[in-house]
Image: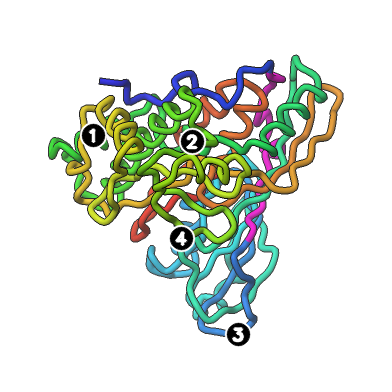
């Protein structure tokens, strides 16, 4: 059986061209993330919206602190996405309007309240367009010009939409325990934690499926039986004429999707199904093992928007916007060729009680 531990070395990059190298996250300010909201608060309504900047806290920890200090139930505070603590990040949170009278007493080192507003509905996981990243790469052996060449290539061809190390915990232990959950061998009883751990196994299978496509020249191509997604509208359709639809894929109009297995998602068929079965077999699993999850589809390719690169004395700064559900580490790994985020991966994401763990990652 294929290893359940996450390592970038197991995942084929887009190209084999020379990379810049470099060090990430020497300090929190080297990694800045600004949430791009799906909508802004209207100014009226029964839900309080907080726009916050934080350093040194995961989103989950900030939500717990707000609940405790404002006298709320744990599930009263909501976020559209999860942001890690090894960065300077901004995002919106929502909570019941009754908490506003106590808000002046809230204090947490490393957290700054930027704006307070109201809205008609509560934030839900995934209620965002994406994230804007500004990342400082230090000690780069390669030149900024080399990094710019790679960035131009990624902008044109797209980025492999791998799940990053945040999903798998230190040493891949999340997936190992997730496999025990699927086999009925785990002693863990918290439903949110169990869902989170199973999602790590789903993510490993998706990564394997995507790596196989890259190895076989199928990143910007489609197979019969693929479920393809339109980049402009988000519509999903089954591929019948692979040659015709591959021309659209080469133009960046559509991309294949991989299956996050569950009871409400149909596995791929025909040629694409054969490839998917190969990815599943690497972990000695079948789709039936995931009957406890709803399942979903995940696009295999994403495109960075408004990508900019600026040379610095010992490296460069790169800025880009990615859609929700994607990992900045996938782009940064392509730029640097390094094992990005390895040391910090264990605490970049935490399960939140009550959510479905829809991925939105930094």
**Could you tell me how far apart the alpha carbons at marks 4 and 1 are, in whole angstroms?**
25 Å
Q: Disc 3 or 1, which lies upstream in sequence?
A: 3
Q: For the residues carrying marks 4 and 2, which lies nearer the camera in this image?
A: 2
Question: Which of 261 and 239 lies nearest the eye of the viewer?
Answer: 239
Tell me if I can see residue 337 in this picture: yes
Q: Answer whether residue 20 is magenta in the image.
A: yes
Residue 181, placed above or below residue 74: above
Could you tell me which secondary element the residue under label 3 belongs to?
Answer: loop
Q: Is residue 349 magenta?
A: no
Q: Quadrant of the N terminus?
A: top left
Question: Left or right of 177: which side holds 249?
Answer: right
Q: According to the image, label 4 marks what residue?
A: 125
Q: Quadrant of the C terminus?
A: top right
Which is more N-terminal, label 2 or label 4? Answer: 4
Q: Residues within 10 Å of mark 4 (few under 14, many from 20)?
A: some
Label 4, secondary structure: give it.
Answer: loop
Is residue 237 found left or right of 324 in the rendered image? Answer: left
Q: Earlier in the sequence, mark 2 or mark 3?
A: 3
Residue drawn at (63%, 31%), measured in percent from left and top? 332
Residue 218 percent across, percent down from the top left? 48, 31
Q: Which residue is mark 3?
A: 44
Q: Which residues are magenta?
A: 19-36
Residue on which disc 2 sits: 162
Judging by the rendered image, the residue that carries numbered circle 1 is 179
Separation of residues labelled 3 and 1 (CA atoms):
46 Å
């Amino acid at each position: 059986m294929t290893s359940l531990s996450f390592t970038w070395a197991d995942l084929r990059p887009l190209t084999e061209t020379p990379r810049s190298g470099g060090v990430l996250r020497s300090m929190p300010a080297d990694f800045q993330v600004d949430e791009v909201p799906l909508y802004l608060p209207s100014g009226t309504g029964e839900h309080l919206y907080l726009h916050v900047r934080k350093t040194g806290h995961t989103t989950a920890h900030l939500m717990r602190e707000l609940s405790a200090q404002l006298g709320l139930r744990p599930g009263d505070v909501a976020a559209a996405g999860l942001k890690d603590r090894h960065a300077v990040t901004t995002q919106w949170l929502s909570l019941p309007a009754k908490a506003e009278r106590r808000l002046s007493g809230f204090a947490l080192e490393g957290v700054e309240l930027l704006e307070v507003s109201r809205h008609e509905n509560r934030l839900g996981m995934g209620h965002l367009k994406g994230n804007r990243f500004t990342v400082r790469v230090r000690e780069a052996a390669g030149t900024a010009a080399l990094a710019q060449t790679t960035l131009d290539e990624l902008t044109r061809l797209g980025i492999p939409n791998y799940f990053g190390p945040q999903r798998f915990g230190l040493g891949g232990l999340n997936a190992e325990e997730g496999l025990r959950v699927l086999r009925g061998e785990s002693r863990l009883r918290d439903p949110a934690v169990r869902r989170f751990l199973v999602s790590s196994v789903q993510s490993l299978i998706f990564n394997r499926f995507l790596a196989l496509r890259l190895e076989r020249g199928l990143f910007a191509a489609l197979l019969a039986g693929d479920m393809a997604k339109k980049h402009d509208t988000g519509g999903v359709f089954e591929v019948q004429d692979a040659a015709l639809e591959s021309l659209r894929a080469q133009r960046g109009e559509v991309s294949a999707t991989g299956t996050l297995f569950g009871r409400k998602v149909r596995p791929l068929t025909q040629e694409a199904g054969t490839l998917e079965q190969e990815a599943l077999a690497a972990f000695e699993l079948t789709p039936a093992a995931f009957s406890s999850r709803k399942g979903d589809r995940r696009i295999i390719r994403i495109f960075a928007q408004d990508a900019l690169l600026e040379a610095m004395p010992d490296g460069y700064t790169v800025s880009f916007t990615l859609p929700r559900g994607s990992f900045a580490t996938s782009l940064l790994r392509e730029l640097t060729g390094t094992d990005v985020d390895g040391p910090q991966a264990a605490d970049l994401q935490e399960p939140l009680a009550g959510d479905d763990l829809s991925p939105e990652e930094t």
